[in-house]
Image: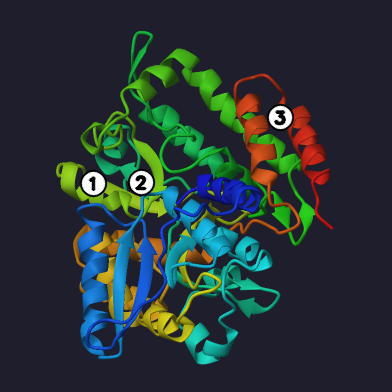
Amino acid sequence: MRRSLSIFIPLVLMFVVLTGCSSGEQNVQAEKTQDGKTVVDFWSFWGSETRRPVIEKIIDDFNQSQNRIFVKHTFLPWGDIWTKNLASVAAGNPADVIINDINTVAQRAENKQVEDLSQYIDDSFKDQFYPHLWGNVEYQNKPYAVPFNTDTRLLYYNKKAFKEAGLDPNKPPQTWEELEEYAKKLDIKNGSRYERIGFYPLWGSTGASSWMTNADNGAGFIEDGELKINTPNKVKALEWIAGWKERLGENTVQAFQAEFGSEQANPFIAEKVAMWVDIGTFYTQLRDYGKDIEFGVAPIPSYSKDSEHWAEGGGFVAEIPKGSDHPEEAMEFIEYLTGPEAQKYWAQKNFDNVANIKAAESVIDELTGDGQSVYQATVDNLKVTKMFPVPVEYPDYHNRVNPIIDNILLGKYSPEDGLRQAEKDVSKTKRE
């Protein structure tokens, strides 16, 4: 659940507007079952051998729980699902419920591609969900989706490596300064070759933007309509990232990255990297493939002792595409899908951070050992997790900023010059 989806969706919006929907597009108009139940067409991208059985069990439970609605699940691959959704909305034959990106709800609301849910939702329903997630499903003070799941980023660290380096395994680094100190002690070097790297900030489930947010008091690139791309602390964050590559050497970074592959070959699981930033579900890889690793989790180190441990988050929502034939029945299914029972089951089976507060808390109570510790840490970390919805005024800003950041990290621009140019480029694209 990274920012790549937030980049992809605006491009799809443009594509659909330009091309419309061909006559051969899949028709998903609702129908009745033989026994008279209303068919609700539900699209998701959950087709893996682990997630598909879970979502289909939830659907089956809903279908068995009442005798008026039958939910039909359609799996569509990642990427294809959103292209087909917007094309079907344009053609007037959409699905009834779809899983979509949480950071682009406002885009679809503005473009009238999703139904307004305010007639179905009151404060008691809204209060089931984490407030920072609910804020992302509203556009002009009206809800257009319901949060389903989310994520946050934590620092995983190898306790055995800490002990070997003379570090306290119960005291992970709290600041960037400590992170650098710990990393140097955790490095193992044989001549000019590194056998173990203490830490590298661009590995794992994080990127330059995460560290820029962390350094800049949790501020993203756009805050309340104001551009915050070229700020002193974001410049310092990029300089800091470049310093890690300079210290380790480009060849070392590339050599380690070349070995990244399957879960078993993950460098943290292989104990070739001592500290690693990732989302909560990384625990399942450790559980399944890293049985001998003694690890701990902690918030991402803060920029300074006076700042918070800011992390980035993403997630997905359930929404009703504009033009659904049976929005009331669709909403009834969404209420079940995002309710405590279904959310708890999803979290238990997938170790996801779910959006329903009651469900998340009940999962913690039933987990044990490392699983409980990690899940509790992810839930606690939601308090310092920032979401970055794509503003309707700057729908394409990711495509302006990210290439420049990439070039800064390649040494083609200085951080200050690059971010100044990025902010200038984005400012020109503002929609009035």
Q: Residues within 10 Å of mark 3 (few under 14, many from 20)?
A: many
Tell me the element at label 3.
Answer: helix
Residue denoted by label 3: 415
Give the camera-side residue of 51 and 193: 51
Image point (25%, 34%), residue name: 262
384 to 208, vertically: above or below: below
| Mark 1 vs mark 2: in front | 1
> Which quadrant: the C terminus?
bottom right
Is residue 398 visible to us here?
yes
Residue denoted by label 1: 286
Tell me the element at label 2.
Answer: strand
Give the camera-side residue of 403 and 216: 403
Colouring mode (rainbow / by chain / secondary structure / one colour): rainbow
- The kind of residue tagged 1 is Leu
- The kind of residue tagged 3 is Pro
Apparent side of residue 16 relative to residue 373 in the rendered image (left or right) = right
- The kind of residue tagged 2 is Tyr
Residue denoted by label 2: 156
Apparent side of residue 50 relative to residue 22 in the rendered image (left or right) = left
For this orientation, the residue located farthest to the left is: 291
**Are dots 1 and 3 in contact, CB under 8 Å?**
no
Precedes in sequence: disc 1 or disc 2: 2
Cα separation, mark 2 vs mark 3, equals 28 Å
Cα separation, mark 1 vs mark 3, equals 35 Å
**Are dots 2 and 3 in contact, CB under 8 Å?**
no
Apparent side of residue 127 relative to residue 142 in the rendered image (left or right) = left
**Are dots 1 and 2 in contact, CB under 8 Å?**
yes
Q: Residues within 10 Å of mark 2 (few under 14, many from 20)?
A: many
Precedes in sequence: disc 1 or disc 3: 1
Q: Position of residue 260 (x, y in %)?
A: 32, 28
Precedes in sequence: disc 2 or disc 3: 2
Cα separation, mark 1 vs mark 2, equals 10 Å
